[in-house]
Image (cartoon, grey):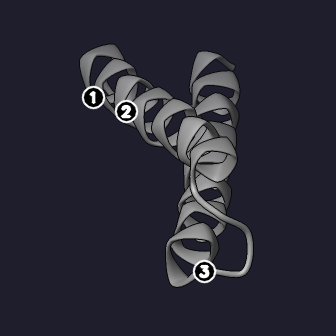
Amino acid sequence: MSPEILQLFFRLGMFVTLTALFLVFAVPKGSAEFVISVLSLAIGVVLLGLVLLLSFFSRK
């Protein structure tokens, strides 16, 4: 996979993760927004993990 695409997905994953992490602490617990923020945080972390795995395996 080209490095530019991996860099794009890494930046997207960082944006989603950092934004969701901020919102987890900003919204009240038990609300629907909190649940969506936690799910967005999980999606961002998974995206970052996939990008790191693809980057690791594409170098070999």
On screen, 42 above or below 10? below
Say left or right for 9 vs 22: left
Does the image show residue 50?
no
Which secondary structure, mark 2?
A: loop
Q: Amino acid at mark 2?
A: Met
Real-space Cα distance between discs 3 and 2? 39 Å
- Residue of label 1: 5
Real-space Cα distance between discs 1 and 3? 35 Å
- Looking at the image, do the residues carrying marks 2 and 1 touch, with CB atoms under 8 Å apart? yes
Does the image show residue 38?
yes
Which secondary structure, mark 1?
A: helix
Give the x, y percent position of residue 4: 26, 17
Q: Amino acid at mark 3?
A: Ser
Give the x, y percent position of residue 21: 63, 40
- Looking at the image, do the residues carrying marks 1 and 3 touch, with CB atoms under 8 Å apart? no
The answer to which of 34 and 46 lies nearer the viewer is 34
Give the x, y percent position of residue 6: 39, 27
**Circle number at residue 31:** 3
Identify the residue at horizontal 59%, vertical 25% (top origin): 55
Mark 2 is surrounded, within 10 Å at the Cα level, by few (under 14), some (14 to 19) or many (20 or more) other residues, namely few
For discs 1 and 3, the disc positioned in front in the rendered view:
3
